[in-house]
Amino acid sequence: MTIGAPTRAALQVEDAMLAVGMNGEPLPVEHGFPVRMLIPGLYGYVSACKWLTEIRATTYETFDAYWVERDWAAEAPIKIAARIDTPAALRTFPAGRRPIAGVAWAQTRGIARVEVKVDDADWVQARLSPEVDADLWRQWVLPFDFAPGQHQITVRAT
Ligand SMILES: Nc1nc2c(c(=O)[nH]1)N[C@H]1C(S)=C(S)[C@@H](COP(=O)(O)O)O[C@H]1N2
Ligand SMILES: [Mo]
């Protein structure tokens, strides 16, 4: 495996690191023991090489990493995203009040707002957990009174 990251991201992104531990313990093998790279804000295939053996300073013109050879983008900043975790898709549950909830993330930028739309109703702002760090997921929740029937839930984050 070869994984190529921009030098400026490795040097300038706050918390870009070569990681040797996780949760106070040596890195687990499946997460890259003995050492891996980690750059917040970039997808794993362009930033997070595990089981590191070598770092080479080169250029995008002279070297294509593994996935770039397979036509993936050479540079890939993580896109803002939000996810609905509950209710799960296609589940059946009693009508009435229950939380719609999930997580949202936009590494290095942070989440300002999460809104939820049920069926054809207007967007409603969800409650957000406190921001611990712009690089971390935010949980969001919106209690909702479900009428009987089938519903379509959409989420968007800013
Ligand atoms: N050596 C090596 N490192 C790798 C990969 C790999 O296939 N081989 N996959 C990358 C991708 S695409 C991701 S998303 C992350 C996933 O590992 P993690 O869950 O430990 O972050 O590892 C990255 N580092
Ligand atoms: Mo990935």
Image: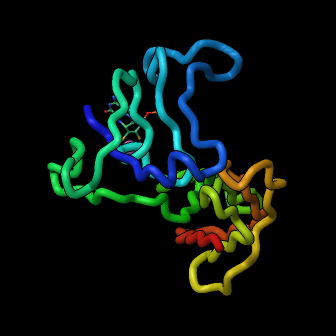
Question: How is colour applied across the structure in the image?
Answer: rainbow
Q: Which residue is drawn at 33% across and 45% down?
A: 4
The number of numbered discs placed on residues in the rendered structure image is: 0
Q: Residue at x 76, y 75 (%)?
A: 125
- Left/right placement of residue 107 relative to residue 110 reads left
Furthest residue in direction right, as rendered: 130
- Left/right placement of residue 148 relative to residue 41 reads right
Q: Position of residue 137 (x, y in %)?
A: 66, 50
Nearer to us in this view, 91 or 124:
124
In the rendered view of the protein, which quadrant contains the C terminus?
Answer: bottom right
Nearer to us in this view, 27 or 65:
65
Q: Where is residue 108 in the image (x, y as percent from the top left)?
A: 63, 58
Furthest residue in direction front, as rendered: 57
Q: Which residue is drawn at 65% across and 13% down?
A: 25
Q: Residue at x 21, y 48 (%)?
A: 63
Where residue 154 sits, quadrant-wise, is bottom right
- Left/right placement of residue 120 relative to residue 71 reads right
Instruction: Answer above or below: position of 96 versus 47.
Output: below
Instruction: Answer above or below: position of 10 versus 24.
Output: below
Q: Position of residue 57 (x, y in %)?
A: 35, 41
Where in the image, quadrant-wise, is ligand 1 located? top left
Where residue 44 sits, quadrant-wise, is top left
Nearer to us in this view, 102 or 2:
2
In the rendered view of the protein, which quadrant contains the N terminus?
Answer: top left
Instruction: Answer above or below: position of 68 versus 111.
Output: above
